[in-house]
Image (cartoon, coloured by chain):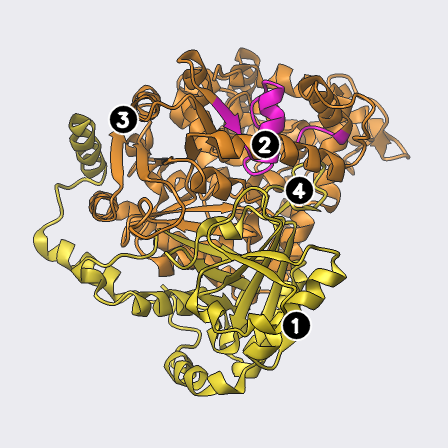
Amino acid sequence: MSGARAEILSAVRQALGRGRLDPAAEAALRVRVAAHRRNLVPARATALDRAGRIDLFVAMAEGVQATVTRVASPAAVPAAVVQYLAAENLPADLVMAPDPGLDAIPWHSRPLLQLRRGPAEPADAVSLTPCFAAVAETGTLMLVSGADTPTTLNFLPDTHIAVVRADQVVATYEEGWDRLRAAVPGEAAGARLPRTVNFITGPSRTGDIEQRIVLGAHGPRRLHIVVIDDPASDGRGQGQDGEDGCEGPAAAG
Amino acid sequence: MHATSRDFSANAGAALADRNLQRALAMMTGSGFPLRRREVVERLPEFEALRDIGQSIKEHTLAHLDFYLELYEEQVAASGGIVHWTRTAEEACAAVLEICRAAGASIVTKGKSMIAEEIGLNGFLESHGITPIETDLGEYIIQLRHEPPSHLIAPAMHLVKEQVADTFRAAHRTLDPQRPLAEPRQLCDEARAELRPRFLAAEIGITGANFLVAESGSSIIVTNEGNGDLTQTLPRVHIVVASLEKLVPTFEDAATLLRLLARSATGQEFSSYTTVSTGPRRPGDLDGPEAYHVVLVDNGRSAMLGGEFHDMLRCIRCGACMNHCPVYAAVGGHAYGWVYPGPMGAVLTPGLIGLEAAAPLPEASTLCGRCESVCPVKIPLPNLLRRWREREYARRLTKRSWRAGLSLWAWVAARPALYHGLSELGSRALGWAGGRRGRFRSLPFAGGWTRMRDLPAPEGRSFHSLWAERQKRGARR
């Protein structure tokens, strides 16, 4: 279909009333792309301090029917998970992302919790994942695929539990992208973005029948978020704050 | 898909008489999309400014579309995916079929995709022995009913829940015939249970794309159900079908358009799932497709570029224009007779299937301007409709009686003395006939109007004569 390729590009150029852009113009466009300049970013989340941002994340997530538990430290996560499962009458059987961050949580403190590490199987009822970032402006989780974080965990089980560290809460999608680009250094040298980046805002839903919202269309019926307000991660969090602080409602265009 | 756009008047007549359709439409206009959109837009002070930026992002991309297409292809290849360039619907369908055959696949799951509807992909695959299964709840319902979508984002908008229940009872024969199916919750659960094994069995997953990101060769889909994610995560092969104008330069640009999309479409702050896909499974990944293909479709886009209907290429398919259209609210999507309904459809359809086949659609509007006022990328829809009307008139596609009426009016209007005389006479006569009541219960030739309401009678003088008198008085002072 190389004939089609050439023909489409030539039709596009003809419609635009020019030939191929000259090298200088192409170079300028490449610079524009590489600059990752932000467009206008809503002030809703950027105007907040760290605590305010976390509060906004929680409020927005709850606004779309996610449930949230806030705990003081990683050590408190297992109890929060057990409590949530019991309250929802769910089995204490989890499939968990084989993620070093999650492994650092003292799960052995709750021996009745059955944990399997790996991608989700059709029979799994509850999954547990970390997240890459959490976007305050709309209460959105940002998850990436990878060897430690299979994507099926985010969609196949009926219940998805995600663990968010306080320093992972960013104001905007743009901040999330910046962090992701920073996490795959040497992108130019061939490193790539993860196969999938999932922005998840509340549980699965549909309004396809009579515009009435029903939760749990095909993805998870329940999304539960455990936020760790860990003072130990403050140093890291504030470092990020400094970096993010320079961004406000940037110039439009 | 066979277009019945030429029969818009007959289609609309049938739609107005369809009680189920009218009930379904009332649910949308009553407490559905428009109300939710207004609430969520009020919560974001930057929304209006974002519309301007959304417009400029799309314009910038279109003005350099050749560059961004090539950059996009380069990046898809670098991440292990393959781009297939296709000029027409036929080429696009053939490309999808070839990938299916090469993979030895016979069952494919599909996420909702308007471009797949446009190129008639399902019918094509079926006729070649491949079973496509729609997984979006609304699409699944209409696939069972062999109907086209009636709305960009809510394809089964035209149905009430009783009709969906009947459809499910007819299709899911192994289930207990006595099972309760009165509520959307039950219908949704049944579709979930029916489709889950098919997600797991499918060998190929096909999705559309809301955006293609040039900087990284990524495709983005936006869904609420999660069906798109199961569609593209579980099978061995993921095929993205997308048209040229879906390109955006960077994730920053995509972020801006995403802020506009969900708010304009469903009135959500953000859709449940915004999924960015870049190439196939990486070494070490535990799941995800082994192959990633993009079928890039022109099908008339390059011909629209730079022309009179260029602005239409900015469209991000949110559906806000139809959600706010009084004509769509009255007749629904099927009356428009092809894939794209509402104001955007009335502009796009003649551009894609030809004005001859779509002739009355530009008339299917009161030009009230609500569509333009809510469009997230500020497409001047009423203006574009007017341009189609001019072409219709020039090509003699408008009805003979309309043409005769317009010619007569033009002849009179071009003669001011005659025009003023006739309008003065007309308004005096109507004022006299209206009598003390000042309105008409019925009028010859205007029964369509007076059946529903009274027509106010003129006060007796024309604006022109009042204005002339006022000017004279002013001059005397």
Q: Which dot marks residue A207?
A: 4
Q: Nearer the viewer, mark 4 or mark 2?
A: 2
Mark 3 closeness class: few <14, some 14–19, many ≥20 residues within 10 Å: many
**Residue type beneath disc 2:** Leu
Q: Are marks 4 and 2 on the same chain?
A: no
SS class of the residue under badge 3?
loop
Q: What residue type is labelled 3?
A: Arg
Q: Which chain carries label 3?
A: B
Q: Do labels 1 and 2 share a chain?
A: no
Q: Label 2, on which residue?
A: B195
Q: Does residue A177 sit above or below A205 in this rendering?
A: below
Q: Distance between the residues labelled 1 and 2?
A: 35 Å
- Pointer 3 residue: B87
Q: Which chain is home to disc 1? A: A
Q: Is residue A185 visible?
A: yes
> Could you say which chain is coloured yellow in the image?
A
Nearest the viewer among A2 and A168 is A168
Check the image and name the residue furthest to the right: B436
> For the residues carrying marks 1 and 3, which lies nearer the camera in this image?
1
Q: Name the residue under label 1.
A: A79
Does the CB distance between marks 1 and 4 fall below 8 Å? no
A33, above or below B62, in the image: below
